[in-house]
Image (cartoon, rainbow, N blue to C red):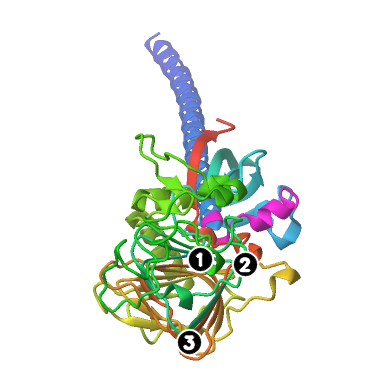
Amino acid sequence: MHETSRHRDEGSALVITVMVMALMAVLGTTVLGVTVNNLGATRRATDATLALDAADAGLNQAVAYLRSSGTRALDACSPACGAANPWGDEGAPMSAPVANSDDQRYEAWIVPQPGGSADARTYRVHSRGLAGAGEARAQRLVEADVTVSLVDVGLPLGVYARSVQGAGTPDLTGVSIFSTGCVWNRSKIDFGGTTDAAYGIPAAVHSSQVITDRNGNNKTCSGSDSKAIHRSQACPSGAFRWDQDSIGGPCSDLAGAHPRYYGRDDGDGDGDIDVDGTFLADDAALLDLFGIEDDPLPEWKLAELRTVATSQGSYSRFASGWSVPDPTTYPNSVLYFDLTRTDPGGTVDLKELGSTWAQSSCEDGAWTRSLLIVIDGGNVKMNGNSEVAASIVLTSRTYGEVDKGNGNPDYVGTLFANTLNLAGAFDFELNQCFLDNLSPSLFSVSVEDYREIDR
């Protein structure tokens, strides 16, 4: 009897043990499944985050492309530019891995949006980020509207200096001179009767001080100067007819021909006349009339330009020993001389450029490159027999001098300086081809209306 009970107890224990083991197996399987699912969910969430990061990287690269390469190529063909420009091709967009990552990638393309103006356009950037591998690869799509504008950069579309000395035989074609200081030896400055390519008025001198035919030895000018071009008459005939300065006056024929620039106007609304024929009241009247800033490149823009120049290998801390940018490698080059701390007052001799950055005649069309030269804290010499198409900016109020050109330098473009000496043989031109192909690095690029499309 006791033996039989013992066998029954052992049998029950065995059954219970088997059941417990089965339960433990089920629980283990369940826990394993939950763990695997959690790990998968975590991995998918991580991949989704990495895909969004990759999409943002593509957006940043697209913005960098707009800053360094401009919009002209996109305007011509986007969204179907093909292999020639994947940034403008929706079907086969620009695709690249994210730096320092093995499994992140972006695909990005840029499409011009309707509307806008010659000074401001909107472009929509589409960027798809990819992360992970295989069929489970995560994707995220972001979009942003990017405004490309010249509004925040007040560079003159012409030749600007705070003081101008005419001398030698300077020959200016299709370009005007602007100054917030005295302009000396006016009869030595020849515009050849051409039309200003940027403003559509006769090329001339515009000063908020006094334009005189006296030399600049005493460095002062006033309305009492006997050689001031407007001292005896507000509306002279001949070569000075379209000039404007602080002692000019009403000229009905000029106002009738070009009311936008010569009509009577209270530009700032204070009740005082700022522009009237050949009269410009002050610095503000001159700068506002022609859309110029007396400090056109703020520090944030200079920082952008230093970054672009550094990435292109054309950033220098010294006025000498620099290399000429290669237009075949960087068709939109920024040549930046950062002399403020290392070589203050140094003079950059642009004869080194030779004809590397010359352009074909404007009639040939199809200008596809641009050169921006920034000299921060120094001077420039436009020298030799160089042929250059460029925007040249000298930022310094202490230096910023353009020295006379020896030889026969031939320039197409714009110039901003502190002082300008036109002595020597000096040819400077502005044409529509140059205006249509300004350096993209001069434009302000701002990102607006960022959104995640598939979240």
Q: Secondary structure at mark 1?
A: helix
Residue at 41% across, 14% down: 9
**Which of pointers 2 and 3 lies earlier in the amino acid sequence?**
2
**Which of pointers 1 and 3 lies earlier in the amino acid sequence?**
1
**Horizontal and vertical percent for residue 285?**
39, 48
Q: Is residue 441 magenta?
A: no
**Horizontal and vertical percent for residue 424?**
46, 86
Frontmost of labels 2 and 3 is 2
Q: CA distance from mark 2 to mark 3?
A: 30 Å
- Left or right of 378 in this view: 14: right
Q: Secondary structure at mark 2?
A: loop
The stretch of residues the image draws in magenta is 66-80
Q: Quadrant of the N terminus?
A: top left
* Residue annotated with mark 3: 352
Q: CA distance from mark 1 to mark 3?
A: 35 Å
Q: Are marks 2 and 3 in contact (CB under 8 Å)?
A: no
Q: Quadrant of the C terminus?
A: top right
Residue at 40% across, 10% down: 5
- Left or right of 368 in this view: 283: left
**Horizontal and vertical percent for residue 149?**
52, 48
The amino acid type of the residue labelled 1 equals: Phe
Residue at 51% across, 30% down: 33
The amino acid type of the residue labelled 2 equals: Thr
